[in-house]
Image (spheres, rainbow, N blue to C red):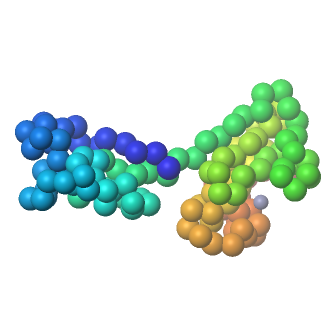
Amino acid sequence: MKIVEVDKSIRELVVANDGYCPCTIVKNEDTKCMCKEFKEQTSGLCHCGRFEKVEELTIHVMHGYDTVQAPTGEDCFGCYISGKHEIYVADNIPADQFFYTIAHEYMHYLQDIEGREFNEKEADDFAQSVFTLKE
Ligand SMILES: [Zn+2]
């Protein structure tokens, strides 16, 4: 998760309001920008629309490797690290396999952030819907 300032124009309103959220009348520690309510929420925009919490996915390309080791100990072209929003993928593999693997692991990322069980069939179906592997 990352905090992004999506509307910089709000900054002036905050300054004009002595550093407090321009949406609130009450000025206390909780309404100082960034406000307590936003700090406690897990995703989405803050009250005034200045900041947003967004999910990020990091893809580590292991240059020169033909496999990566999954947390399970198994060697594979790529793996998704549950809860960490990270994909590891080897790049010394055929290009179509490389992109197929990223698509497959990307579906595991979606399953993770949506709080669903990891589903290999769904990940393969998704990867096959975007890439066709050459025989
Ligand atoms: Zn998988």
Residue at image location 19% in from the left, 54% down from the top: 28
Q: Is residue 25 visible?
A: yes
List x then y, in percent, for residue 44: 36, 58
Task: Tell which of 57 and 28 is nearer to you.
Answer: 28
Number of numbered tags placed on the structure image:
0
Q: Is residue 7 left or right of residue 105?
A: left
Q: Is residue 30 above or below residue 116?
A: above
List x then y, in percent, for residue 120: 76, 66
Q: Is residue 74 left or right of residue 60?
A: right
> Ligand 1: which quarter?
bottom right
Residue at image location 23% in from the left, 48% down from the top: 32
Q: Is residue 95 left or right of residue 83?
A: right
Q: Is residue 26 above or below residue 87?
A: below
Single out the residue that lies furthest toward the top. Answer: 64
Task: Tell which of 51 and 24 is nearer to you.
Answer: 24
Single out the residue that lies furthest toward the bottom. Answer: 117
Q: Is residue 110 above or below residue 57?
A: below
Quadrant of res 89: top right
Single out the residue that lies furthest toward the front. Answer: 28
List x then y, in percent, for residue 36: 31, 56
Task: Tell which of 67 and 38 is nearer to you.
Answer: 38
Task: Tell which of 78 and 43 is nearer to you.
Answer: 43
Q: Is residue 127 visible?
A: no
Residue at image location 83% in from the left, 45% down from the top: 77
List x then y, in percent, for residue 12: 13, 36
Q: Is residue 134 above or below residue 104?
A: above
Q: Is residue 125 left or right of residue 34?
A: right
Residue at image location 92% in from the left, 52% down from the top: 74
